[in-house]
Image (spheres, rainbow, N blue to C red):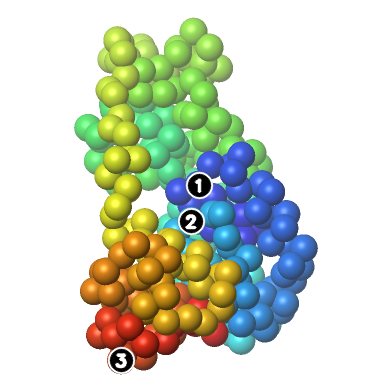
Amino acid sequence: MLVSEVMLQQTQAVRVTPHYLRFLRRFPTVDALASAPRSEVVRAWAGLGYNRRAVALSETARVVVRDHGGSVPADPERLQQLPGVGPYTAAAVASFAFGAAVPAMDTNVRRVVARARLGLEAGEADAGDVREAARSWTDRRDPGAWNQAIMDIGREVCRPVPRCGSCPIAETCAARRAGRVPVGRPPRRKAGADAFEGSSRQLRGRIVAVLRECGRTSVSAIATRLDASPGRVAEALAALRADGLVAAGPAALDGRPGGRVALAR
């Protein structure tokens, strides 16, 4: 469950499923994941993006084995102490895997709770009030199913411009009763492709892809292959090293052509 929730951070489920199945075949237990070199975990992460999640998951497995006897903790507060596990992921794992009566507050859930319980848009409501409303509304008999149901309603029905005619809780919705349901077209989302193209984040991802393939190489080889200046490569390597993704010495971080780089172990 923890692996799937980390993979689902910023990635759609349809993309995650095949990677998740391959990842579990490679690392079937938390001990297998904890004992694997970080470089192997990063290689197995190929295709999912946001490679820092692979580093966090690798470190989390080691913490679970070292500090929790190889068992993922069930308590949301203890889960949040694991690397890369924030409030939403902790609540989702605690709820879905262990039956803890805690709401998993993603964007969709906040929108549904704010409208249905408070009669407000999520952006108008106090965050603490939304959390408290969600806690009081959570089905304590089956919190996992409740969380999934509210997520599904938010994703499919209670969208920025809601489809109230298809909503199973429309009759009890506070926003609908108060006549505060948004109408019209949803705001257009800005395409992210143009901003991503040529960005430092794109370059970092491409460097990791090169290192997955060749293991260890030089700044010059990376710069030539990716048509990037040694200076830009060095900047990207500094960020990747800070994230725990690569091992790079002073020469590489200075952008010297012969500086050597590899995936961190």
Asked if the residue at tag 1 contacts the one at tag 3, i.e. Cβ–Cβ closer than 8 Å, the answer is no
Q: Which mark is residue 11?
A: 1
Q: Which mark is residue 49?
A: 2
Q: Secondary structure at mark 3?
A: helix
Q: Is residue 233 left or right of residue 29?
A: left
Q: Residue furthest front?
A: 224
Q: Quadrant of the C terminus?
A: bottom right
Q: Secondary structure at mark 1?
A: loop
Q: Is residue 165 visible?
A: yes
Pick the residue in front: 202 or 33.
Answer: 202
Q: Is residue 110 above or below residue 160?
A: below
Cα distance between the residues tagged 3 and 1? 34 Å
Spot occupied by residue 98 in the image (x, y as percentages of width and height): 66, 57
Q: Which residue is mark 3?
A: 250
Q: Is residue 63 left or right of residue 50?
A: right
Taking the spot 51% from the left edge, 73% from the top edge, the residue there is: 211
Cα distance between the residues tagged 1 and 2? 8 Å
Asked if the residue at tag 2 contacts the one at tag 1, i.e. Cβ–Cβ closer than 8 Å, the answer is yes
Q: Is residue 95 left or right of residue 185?
A: right
Q: Is residue 236 above or below residue 152?
A: below
Amino acid at circle 2: Gly
- Quarter-wise, where is residue 129 in the image? top left
Cα distance between the residues tagged 3 and 2? 27 Å
Amino acid at circle 1: Thr
Q: Earlier in the sequence, mark 3 or mark 2?
A: 2
Amino acid at circle 3: Pro
Q: Is residue 60 above or below residue 174?
A: below
